[in-house]
Image (cartoon, helix red, strand yellow):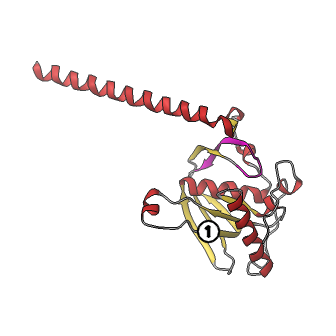
Amino acid sequence: MAILKIARMGHPVLRNPAEAIADPTAPEIRALAEGMLETMVDAPGVGLAAPQVHVPLRMVIFRLPLTELESMAGGEASLTVLINPVLESIGEDMEEGWEGCLSVPGLRGHVPRYTHLRYHGVDLTGQVIDRTVDGFHARVVQHECDHLDGILYPQRMTDMTGLIFDSEMRHVIAANRAKELEARELEAKESEERASEEVEATGK
């Protein structure tokens, strides 16, 4: 399967809701999934939705990075092909995090997402997928499934000052490191002050 062309922000295929897949086991759906996987790996990306390759059908694929422990154990990142997905948030807790998108090249945005999520659908064999997830997994699923409803991540943003070029992420990283250092220094200072107060109290 050849590398598929990725639609970019502004193309009509990314603006409209995708259609449900009548037969997830059809050979053409498997061929589409294989082409999407090859395209995602080549890009490279973590996930891809069918509308991003100009096919308005309700299918997404994603492969989450392994944790450090999984890598040490010799594990391999497993691919999920999710067809006709349905998402349900668990609770109202949301968290902002940085996201990029192959259809919005060169940019990155700070996007609020639900932290806990249940999703279900079927795979290429018609078997049911039903998972409850959180953290980065939940973020990836929400991002990819948004494509099926004609939504790109900038539309989810509440503060557009959080939309930046990838090349400027170094400034964000530096600022975050400075904040972490300041927080650690403040914590150390407060710890020293508490210890000093305890010594004085004991002396009395």
Please tell me whether mark 1 sits on a helix, a strand or a loop.
strand
Say which quarter of the image contains residue 204.
top left
Q: Position of residue 2 (x, y in %)?
A: 79, 68
Q: Is residue 17 magenta?
A: no
**Residue sitting at x 71%, y 56%:** 43
Taking the image as shown, residue 59 lies to the left or right of residue 91, namely: right
The residue depicted at 71 percent of the width and 50 percent of the height is 101
Q: Which residue is mark 1?
A: 79
Q: Amino acid at mark 1?
A: Leu
Q: Tell whether 93 sits left or right of 166.
A: left
Q: Is residue 99 above or below residue 160?
A: below
Left/right placement of residue 75 relative to residue 8 reads: left
Picture coordinates of residue 113 (x, y %)? 62, 48
The answer to which of 204 and 82 lies nearer the viewer is: 82
Placement of 47 over or under 22, stated as above or below = above
Q: Please state the extent of the stretch shown in magenta in the rendering.
A: 101-114
| Residue 100 vs residue 128, the one in the foreground | 100
Q: Residues within 10 Å of mark 1 (few under 14, many from 20)?
A: few
Query: Whole-percent x and y of residue 11?
Result: 87, 52
Residue 71 point in image, percent of width and height: 47, 62
| Side of 3 where 71 appears, left or right | left
